Amino acid sequence: MKRRRPYLLRALYEWIVDSGEVPNVLVDAEIDGVVVPLEHVRDGQIVLNISPQAVRNLSLGNDYVMCEGRFSGRSVELILPIESVRAIYCRDSGQGLAFDDEDLLEGEGDGELGADVTQASQPTNGPKPPGDKPKLRLV
């Protein structure tokens, strides 16, 4: 299966913009291939406003997020490998999605999320095995 991160990123972006909110992305600036203004990087990360009003020529591709943004009055080309995007969320409400490192692995469709969906769709009327506790995880 294809990586799910770019599809989730595009869907959340559209949902945030359609809701009248400002989409922000949290980027790991230490990933190879990231092109951002280094003077704005804090603790190896940068938060970018990718709203239609803040950037130009936004491309949410399967491998890269690319656009032009303005920093301190100068135009800067931003290049974000898809694996560098750690989260997308609404600036004001904070609603959104944080991506797990498991999303970076080859064969993403075989990860824990797929297992959780399968378990949730099975009937729960039988006894549970000992030590099988429910688990919450950030997706």
Image: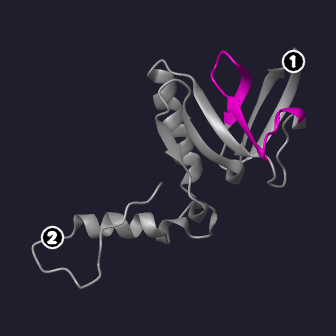
Q: Position of residue 116 (x, y in %)?
A: 35, 66
Q: Which mark is residue 123?
A: 2
Farthest bottom residue in view: 130
Is label 2 in a helix, a strand or a loop?
loop
Q: Give the spatial CA distance, label 2 vs label 1.
A: 56 Å
* Residue at 33% over, 63% down: 117
Question: Is 45 or 68 nearer to us in this picture?
Answer: 45
Q: Is residue 43 magenta?
A: yes
> Farthest residue in the left direction?
125
Residue positioned 87% across, 14% down in the render? 73
Sequence-wise, which precedes: disc 2 or disc 1? 1
Against 129, residue 10 (above or below) is above
Task: Decide if residue 132 is on the left or right side of residue 136.
Answer: left
Classify 10 Å Cα crowding around label 1: few (below 14), some (14-19), many (20 and above): few
Q: Which residue is mark 1?
A: 72
Judging depth in this view, the residue of 54 and 106 nearest the camera is 54
Q: Which residues are magenta?
A: 39-59
Which residue is drawn at the image coordinates 50% and 44% (left, top)?
97
**Residue 119 or residue 132, whichever sits in front:** 132
Q: Is residue 97 above or below residue 105?
A: above
Residue 132 falls in which quadrant of the image? bottom left
